[in-house]
């Protein structure tokens, strides 16, 4: 079995996928792909004024490109929430600081004293029994340089695995647990109490996207603790092997933030990594997260 992950040259299996994306056209806006495999900047649109036809086209683009980017939106927090709510019910995050006045909006305020620690590949709240459909992140204040966010297509990551490894993880179940990240900042008593509220979640290692039917590699370093029924050492090696796939540049796109930029990504299909290279500059972002469905 190949656990090395070595691969040289183009990943030819992506050709049909990239051709489909390159052919995408919409009546109510333009899309400018950020990479051949995922991510597109949507141009000629105002997120405050979306008619039903435009919204339907956005739904198609969202599932196709997996992460959409919008420039110069100038949304208020209320308008940010209104846009996110069109996609589903919003969550309250139990461990991250909310914006004053609305518990559904997380505020990431980083500076010389509060550093960015989101620089690990992950899918938001995979530790929930019912994880996120997607996240809408808005730039309030950006550093003069740095602070980009990277995204990785985890369908491409799955498709790129060798066949014997795909067979090995077929039907496997992984445990996702908040204690590996947020729990590390709690004392033992508090952690035990929060675990009663948010017990470890069991999700398939390979989930199926509920809209596209694509197979998605659904493990990440921050929240995935182990694979059920597997020896601890064997599980650790396998999880590390699978998590490395997010680091393949051919599966990625990278977004450079400007003030009033918005990114909307599919947590069912991608992982993301917030580059923490801007310290001690300030970076302030607000996020609304849409509740999804139980992975299958």
Image: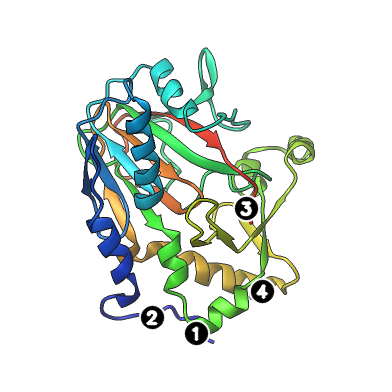
Q: CA distance from mark 1 to mark 3?
A: 27 Å
Q: Earlier in the sequence, mark 3 or mark 2?
A: 2
Q: Which residue is mark 4?
A: 233
Q: How is the image coloured?
A: rainbow
Circle 2 Cα neighbour tier, 10 Å, few/some/many (<14 / 14–19 / ≥20): few
Which residue: 33% across, 42% down?
Answer: 68
Q: Which residue is mark 2?
A: 6
Of discs 3 and 2, which sits in the foreground? 3
Circle 4 Cα neighbour tier, 10 Å, few/some/many (<14 / 14–19 / ≥20): few
Which sits in the foreground, 119 or 61?
A: 61
Is 101 left, or right, of 185 in this rendering?
Answer: left
Of discs 1 and 3, which sits in the foreground? 3
Q: Tag 3's secondary structure?
A: loop
Disc number for residue 295: 3
- Tell me whether the residue at label 4 lies in contact with that at label 1, contact meaning CB atoms closer than 8 angstroms: no
Of discs 4 and 3, which sits in the foreground? 3
Q: CA distance from mark 4 to mark 1?
A: 17 Å
State the residue lying farthest toward the top.
Answer: 101
User: Relative to 275, is 50 above or below?
Assistant: above
Q: Which residue is mark 1?
A: 2
- Tell me whether the residue at label 2 lies in contact with that at label 1, contact meaning CB atoms closer than 8 angstroms: yes
Is 42 left, or right, of 218 in this rendering?
Answer: left
Q: Position of residue 283 (x, y in %)?
A: 33, 31
């Amino acid at each position: 079995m190949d656990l090395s992950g070595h691969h040289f040259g183009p990943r030819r299996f992506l050709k049909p996928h990239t051709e489909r994306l390159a052919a995408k056209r919409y009546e109510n806006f333009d899309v400018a792909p950020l990479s051949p495999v995922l991510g597109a900047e949507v141009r000629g649109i105002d997120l405050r004024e979306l008619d039903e036809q435009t919204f339907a086209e956005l739904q198609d683009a969202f599932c196709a490109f997996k992460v959409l980017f919008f420039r110069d939106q100038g949304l208020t927090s209320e308008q940010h929430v209104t846009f996110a709510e069109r996609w589903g019910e919003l969550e309250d995050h139990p461990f991250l600081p909310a914006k004053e006045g609305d518990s559904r909006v997380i505020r990431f305020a980083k500076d010389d004293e509060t550093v960015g620690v989101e620089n690990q590949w992950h899918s938001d709240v995979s530790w929930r029994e019912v994880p996120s459909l997607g996240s809408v992140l808005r730039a309030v204040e950006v550093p003069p340089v740095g602070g980009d966010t990277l995204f990785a297509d985890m369908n491409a990551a799955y498709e790129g695995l060798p066949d014997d490894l795909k067979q090995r993880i077929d039907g496997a179940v992984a445990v996702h647990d908040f204690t590996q990240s947020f729990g590390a900042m709690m004392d033992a008593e508090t952690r035990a109490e929060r675990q009663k509220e948010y017990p470890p979640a069991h999700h398939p290692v390979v989930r199926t996207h509920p809209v596209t039917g694509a197979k998605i590699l659904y493990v990440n370093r921050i929240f995935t603790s182990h694979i059920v029924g597997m020896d601890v050492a064997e599980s650790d090696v396998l999880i590390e092997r699978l998590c490395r796939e997010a680091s393949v540049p051919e599966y990625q796109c990278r977004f450079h933030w400007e003030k009033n930029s918005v990114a909307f990504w599919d947590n069912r299909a991608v992982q993301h990594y917030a580059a923490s290279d801007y310290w001690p500059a300030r970076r302030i972002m607000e996020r609304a997260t849409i509740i999804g469905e139980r992975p299958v």
